[in-house]
Amino acid sequence: MNTPVRFYFDFSSPYSYIASAWIDALAARHGRTVDRQAILLGVTFQAAELKSPVAYPIKRDYSVRDFARSARFHGLPCRLPEPFPIPTQNAARIFWWLKDTRGEAAAAEWARAGLAAVFQRGLPLNDAATLKAVAAGAGLDADAAEAVWNDPVWKDRLKRANEEAIAAGVFGAPFFIVDGEPFWGNDRQPQIERWLSSGPF
């Protein structure tokens, strides 16, 4: 079976940023590709009656510490934008535009560029000028990107992606579906590796 590993992520999710650094290599080791799905965590949280861990005062300091520690564990820098978290619907609309018109590789390149901008450079992708600059730095036409995120077609595309994710049982990010089996969280990496290596356990 060579079905893609489906990878749900949000541009404002630190653990999605970390997972993005290892998921392609892991999948490739087992002859799989990655099917990225940009979603909005706020929408899935609402559907699941959840909140971001940083929304709880008792969890926020720990969560921010764990974001940085987890990134270091994987050899990655981590710099959160201020304030954090940030709305990422515009970056996600650009993703779906690229995926649907240019294919998975172009969308994946944008996903990596956007996540790096947020978590390596601390850039607020919710700011229009910043997002246009990041898009230009990723080789996109900045004005075209701005037109995309204001276009009802791509607004609806992201809405459908969120609805489809919720229907598939997604309630957080990163979230993976492997051969129909759901895995939630960056720390599921060893389980995904074993599943792809030797099948269900």
Image (cartoon, grey):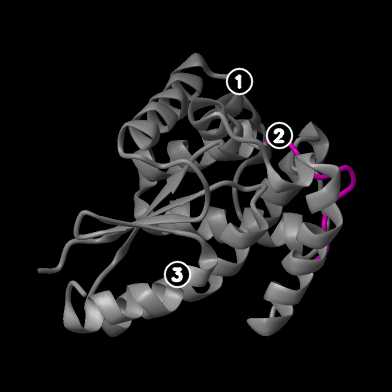
Residue highlighted by disc 3: 188
* Quadrant, the C terminus: bottom left
| Residue 84 or residue 104, whichever sits in front | 84
Span highlighted in magenta in the image? 78-87
Was residue 143 drawn as part of the magenta stretch in this picture?
no
In the rendered structure, the answer to whether residue 82 lies left or right of residue 187 reads right
Please state which amino acid type lies under the numbered disc 1.
Asn
Distance between mark 1 and mark 2 Cα atoms: 15 Å
Distance between mark 3 and mark 2 Cα atoms: 26 Å
User: Which residue is depicted at the point 36% across and 75% down?
Assistant: 191
Distance between mark 1 and mark 3 Cα atoms: 35 Å
- Secondary structure beneath label 3: helix
Crowding near pointer 2: few (<14 within 10 Å), some, many (20+)?
A: some
Q: Position of residue 78 (x, y in %)?
A: 78, 68
In the rendered image of this protein, does residue 12 appear above or below residue 68? above
Secondary structure character of the magenta stretch overall = loop
In the rendered image of this protein, does residue 63 appear above or below residue 143? below
In the rendered structure, the answer to whether residue 64 lies left or right of residue 142 reads right
